[in-house]
Amino acid sequence: MKILLKNSNIVDGTGQPSFEGSVVVEREKIAEIIRGAAPIDFDGKVIDCTGLTVAPGFIDAHSHNDWFAARQDPIPFFKPFAEQGIATQVVGNCGFSPFGYEAGTPHQALLGGGLFHTGDARGDFSTYAGWREAAGKKTPLNLAPLQGHGPIRTGICGYENRPLTKDELARRDAILEQSLEQGLFGASFGLMYEPDRYATADELEGAARIVAKYDGVLTVHPRACSAASTSYSPPFGGRPHNLRALDEMIALTRRTGVKMQYSHLIFVGESSWKTVDESLELIDRIRADGYDFAYDLYPMTFGVSVITVVLPTWYLSMPPAKRSRPWARLRLAAEINLTKKLLGFGFDDIQIAWIGEGYEELCGKRISEIAAEWKSSEVDTYIKLVELSQARGRVNMYKYYHDEIVNRLIRHQPSLFMTDAWIEEKGVQNASAYGAYPKFLALSREGQGLSLEKTVRKMSGAVADRFSLKGRGYLKKGYAADITVFNEATVTNIGDEPVRPKGIEYLFINGKKVVSGGLADEAAMAGSGKILQKNSS
């Protein structure tokens, strides 16, 4: 059956001026783009889009929904993303993917780094092909996967803080190459998380060269996102650590020529905000030198992370029994307290999202608030929370940046838009999973971002170009019928609340209408997406 979306304002994903017209959908493809008046006699279903904008289905440049796609019922984890107009997500970021590790590894329980697990999904995910077969039957949205470096290293040696041996490197390379040969779009590092934080420079360079050989994109969660961090020793002093982390990835890009996507360029803590100018200058410089270096951002001023993210490497790599020794506690407390002072970021900026069963009353509270209730120091409270969660707790971290920085990054040419969010089964939800893209649109309408056309481009065509998503990201004849219809006048800036946005009227995924009147059709969403393959539509 054909569908006519008539009398709309068409924003086609190119960044060029919008125009009045209509879009014809036939099965999974866009059959025609009509400029001007709609046909009077149309043999098919007609949806009047007068007063609405028709755009390419939004593409989320940084997601983790690969961890939920193969579950028995993935709909609840994808529904909020569909209701904000997202049709496609780039997954496998921050060094995490649910696939690509040595079969039979004794370290299976460590996969996901405490943030993710595959739940009731069934199948052998040691290879990408195994996960693709399971997820492809169920995924509600289109997914463009990357191979996480973390599961490869975890499968080989767990969270051991040491270089890989020559034999282990060969095994790592074989898994990475196998995944890329099977159609992945690239790979990812999570240098702030275990086990990638233990990888040597040579180890990272070898992986980057493999990604470059396959013309893939390497996305990287950097080693530090703040001026002072526990990722470096000592955790303070010298060049701001977020700039050192950026330097590290710029140098890696220059050595290998890999296409670098710097994940979620953020500036955690007030002391980091003064490094924005130099960060953007560094990025502009390497791009001017001919290297392919870009980054992504969300419009929220906070983000989600694992509770151990602020702990130093020396502490995490210690056996649990030794962590409680007085000298270790004293050193840890001294480092954390000094780092907080230098960073302009404190325990009142860390909100507990989840600790574990039996501790639900802690959800939504700041660590400083819990410390006052427990009549304990903030550091001791924090360490206790890490222990209670078995180092797998989840936190919302504030002061990632402020609105003026967000608006500046939105306008910076190399930036792309993303959510970096997922739906949790328990605890506090991340508002970015519900309304990041409507917020980008609202900022555009309010004059705080880019024009509507350029805003839509950064959440559609530009992402498709960046990750080589063939046949998607644009409203063009013959392209996949991934289409978002929204009301520019009413699309809602939801702030920090995890609630359904307003103004997203329809979403079509591969020609199937999965959102109508802002509400997702769960039956239609079931299996409406595809696992995308590089160089195929």
Image (cartoon, rainbow, N blue to C red):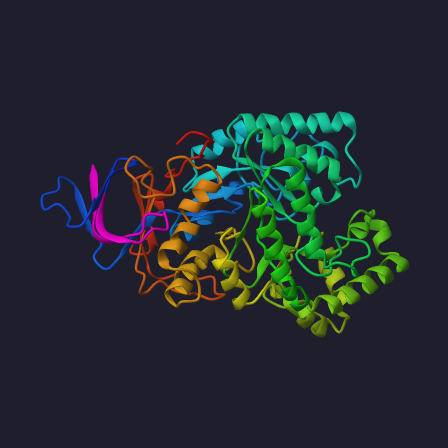
Task: Judge from the rendering whether residue 70 lies leftward or rightward of residue 4; answer left or right.
Answer: right
Q: Is residue 300 visible to us here?
A: no
Magenta stretch encompasses residue 4? yes
Magenta stretch: helix, strand or loop mostly: strand
Q: Quadrant of residue 492?
A: bottom left
Query: Which residue is pictured at 82% across the width and 56% down the height?
Result: 234
Residue 17, given in percent of the width and then of the height, sits at 31, 54
Residue 351, given in percent of the width and then of the height, sits at 62, 65
Residue 279, given in percent of the width and then of the height, sits at 62, 57
* Residue occupying the far front of the picture: 289
Report the front residue among 8 and 113. 8
Against 352, residue 210 (above or below) is above
Range covered by the magenta-colored residues:
1-23
Task: Judge from the rendering whether residue 34 lies leftward or rightward of residue 225; answer left or right.
Answer: left
Q: Is residue 282 visible to us here?
A: yes
Report the front residue among 348 and 117. 348
Report the front residue among 199 and 356. 199
Magenta stretch encompasses residue 361? no
Q: Looking at the rendering, in which quadrant would you find the C terminus?
A: top left
Query: Which residue is pictured at 56% across the width and 67% down the height?
Result: 402
Q: Quadrant of residue 454?
A: bottom left
Report the front residue among 222 and 118. 222
* Residue occupying the far right of the picture: 327
Q: How many marks?
A: 0
Query: Which residue is pictured at 64% across the width and 61% down the height?
Result: 359
Against 161, residue 133 (above or below) is above
Residue 69, given in percent of the width and then of the height, sits at 48, 40
Q: Looking at the rendering, in which quadrant would you find the N terminus?
A: top left
